[in-house]
Image (cartoon, rainbow, N blue to C red):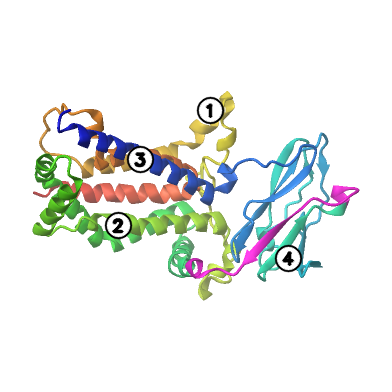
Amino acid sequence: MSPATPPRSQKFLQFVVTFAIVYLATSFGLRYFFPEQFKNGTDAPPETIILTPLQKKVPMGRNFSVKVENRTASGIAMVDRCPDPPLIIERVLEDRLYQVELEEPVLPCSALTEIPALSSTTVDLSSWKYSAFKEPGTYRISLPPETAGAGESPSTEIRVTKPGIFISLFRAFISKPLLNGLILIASLLPVHSLGFSIIFLTVLVRLLLYFPSQHALQSQKKMQTLQPKIDEIKKKHAGDQQKITEATMALWKQEKINPFQSCLPTLIQIPILLGLFFIIRDSNHVELARHLLYPPFQTLDWTFNTVFLGFLDLAYVPFRDVNSWLPTPAHVITVLKNAWLPLIVALLQFGQMKLAFAKKKKPEKDERPLAERLDAQSMMVYMLPVMIFFIAGGMPAAVSMYWTASTVFSIGQQVVVNRKK
């Protein structure tokens, strides 16, 4: 057996483990952040009516909905209860039920007339969150007796909690500045366009991050110039990962390079993307964001225009119906119609990384096996855009809009860095 065999097997194993971790992390993340699109079906018996909260535990201020699934052979005729919610909301205190005090919904009430047989609908209760759910506790959600007919009304429970320290800090330092910044920009625009507000906000954020981002890109470029020396270290200490790590760290220290500096701009972008996701999901109607508004914006008489350029709905989640895509031609058309913006994000991210790892001199043909050539850099260049495609598709299109504008800005910075000697 040749001395080169152990490192090849180690690198192949590293590739397999990395791929498995990325796949599992992505799957868990999609199911955690987007339970409506990626959750598993319920095991409830057929011929029943099922109420299922999309989130059983909800922090105060967040929007939430209940899925009503009609598994019977006949339709359910719903009673128009506007301005009250279409479902009964009761507070659970010491095993007793109490009617909640309802105020006018913050958004116009739309009557739910019927749920056809063998189908389901999602009832949004967010318009009553500031009255019916104004206190933490457990709430029982049920069908009105006149809808359920004889027998016990189908019901479910939702637990409303006070925001924890993490959510409170996230709202204070991420969600509130982002939302109020978008409102400030939109208030200066003729049609209060959310799309143009996001573009202007992206430019502002990237200008604030310009110098740390530039230092990170320069550090990344300097690390790339050291790659031949790192390859020599790997060849010299083949089979001994500890010595490779020690020698590489010593080289970075000698050249005064911080390998983690290049990760800083990306780490900063993550909470911004998440903050924008929650804002669009819960606050695209400003009336649903009272708990996030600064005092000057508490009495707004307008809301965001979420249609960008006359055709792109920024509140729409492109992969919302992912569980029903296959295999009909209509579902394929749906994919082609809605997947283009996440695809643009993924392609731009791929282009940005190719620029980041570009070499001025064409390398000699590498005869090493594929498993040995698939290092972390290669996996990041080709796997990360694929992950980004599905992540962006599971978020509102507004997040992809920010991601696109931010990546274009990054590409411009990368071009400037690459041109410097």
Seen at 50% across and 44% down, the residue is: 394
Q: Amino acid at mark 4?
A: Glu
Q: Secondary structure at mark 4?
A: loop
* Numbered disc in front, either 4 or 2: 2
Seen at 65% across and 59% down, the residue is: 126
Pick whichever of labels 1 and 2 is earlier in the sequence: 2
Label 4 crowd bin: few (<14), some (14–19), many (20+), radius 10 Å: some
Label 2 crowd bin: few (<14), some (14–19), many (20+), radius 10 Å: some
* Numbered disc in front, either 3 or 4: 3
Q: Are marks 3 and 1 in contact (CB under 8 Å)?
A: no
Pick whichever of labels 2 and 3 is earlier in the sequence: 3
Q: Amino acid at mark 2?
A: Pro
- Image quadrant assignment for residue 109: bottom right
* Numbered disc in front, either 3 or 1: 3
Name the foreground residue: 176 vs 166: 166
Name the foreground residue: 369 vs 71: 369
Verify whether residue 159 appears in magenta.
yes
* Numbered disc in front, either 1 or 2: 2
Pick whichever of labels 3 and 4 is earlier in the sequence: 3
Pick whichever of labels 3 and 1 is earlier in the sequence: 3
Q: Amino acid at mark 1?
A: Val
Seen at 53% across and 53% down, the residue is: 305
Which disc, if any, is residue 265? 2
Pick whichever of labels 4 and 2 is earlier in the sequence: 4
Q: Are marks 3 and 4 in contact (CB under 8 Å)?
A: no
- For disc 4, the marked residue is 104
Q: Position of residue 157 (x, y in %)?
A: 71, 58
